[in-house]
Image: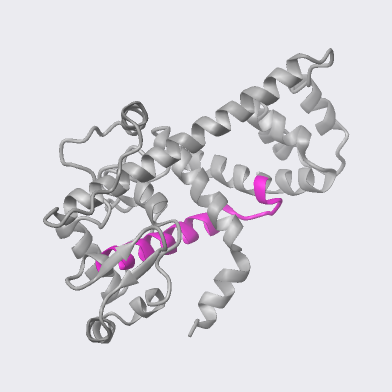
Amino acid sequence: MASNADNVDSKLWPKLVVKEFIDIMVDEVTNGNMPNGVFNTRTWTSMTTKLNFKAKSSYKKEQLKAKMHRLRALYREFSALVNHTGFGWDPETNTVTASEEVWKDYIRVHDKAAQFQRRGLDHYNLLGIIFNKNTATGVLHHSSTQDPPNTDEEIELENQYRNNGVHVNLDNDSSNDDVQELERITRSGKRQIQEKEGKSKKSTRTMQMGDALAAWADASKARAERYRGHIMEATSSIVTPDYSITKCVTALEGIEGISVDTYMKACEKFKEAEYREMFLAMSAEMRHAWLHRL
């Protein structure tokens, strides 16, 4: 049965928005913006802006950090479960398989795992790209942007993560450069998960992560193709969108009630093309909200 906290979280974070947030984080990881296992302040600001733009919402940076912390806890809980003797996981149906007795014994010690009896963790492979030791090196080095574990259960999961790794893992000699890994997997083609008897769990997990990365690379390539298609359509037109600093400042001048400090902060943001484009695409209401949060 879902707790009150779970109900509040589901209302604040609809499933589609959670997927958008995970996609944004995966993009940042694969672009090398999580070098020490944590996102820096600049990356958090960028991710917050992108998510609010895509979800047409007004999340604060602290809310994204808290959600990432909860996703990380779920990921470790689920990884510990599927690594436990007697459990299996079908990535196609996202279901965990085990006997009733195995479930009963495990839940007696790990009560939070009960939520995975009917359905596994959504987007598990994508979360693996973010939280896996080999793709997010140093994720256990807590900083001011990520709270350390503060319960006995989280500390236990922390220790399991340190000692045993995670369910989806890469070979020890895999490259630390996520971008190079994506390119290598893309060139070699999508890996097939081997189910032959006698294969070790590590081999299967390696291939599952390979599939996740390859699928993400394919999706990124598709998005790039669509983007290039849009660019071709745009350049074939006589009118070219104007996202210049001058146009942004002119639009800023037309907004009443902003302080000099906010005005100058906005001008600093306008030095980057992505902020100029997003600002000009925003409605008047969203521009006010964005300026208010600077």
Q: Quick check: is 63 in the magenta stretch?
A: yes
Residue 214, x across and y down, in percent: 38, 38
Front-most of 155 and 253?
155
Q: In this view of the protein, can residue 33 be seen by the observer?
A: no
Magenta segment range? Answer: 54-80
The quarter of the rendered structure image containing the C terminus is top right
Point 44% across, 40% down: residue: 216
Give the main secondary structure, helix, strand or loop, of the magenta stretch.
helix
Front-most of 288 and 48?
48
Give the answer, above or below, for where 105 lies relative to 163: below
Give the answer, above or below, for where 99 lies relative to 34: below
Residue 50, x across and y down, in percent: 61, 42
Residue 186, x across and y down, in percent: 37, 30
Point 81% across, 33% down: residue: 252
Give the answer, above or below, for where 249 lies relative to 43: above
Say which quarter of the image contains residue 236. Answer: top right
- Residue furthest toward the left? 198
Point 17% across, 71% down: residue: 85
Point 31% across, 53% down: residue: 142
- Relative to 254, 171 lies left or right: left
- Relative to 64, 49 lies left or right: right
Q: In this view of the protein, can residue 152 be seen by the observer?
A: yes
Q: Quick check: is 113 in the magenta stretch?
A: no
- Relative to 186, 99 lies left or right: left
Say which quarter of the image contains residue 177. Answer: top left
Q: How many marks?
A: 0
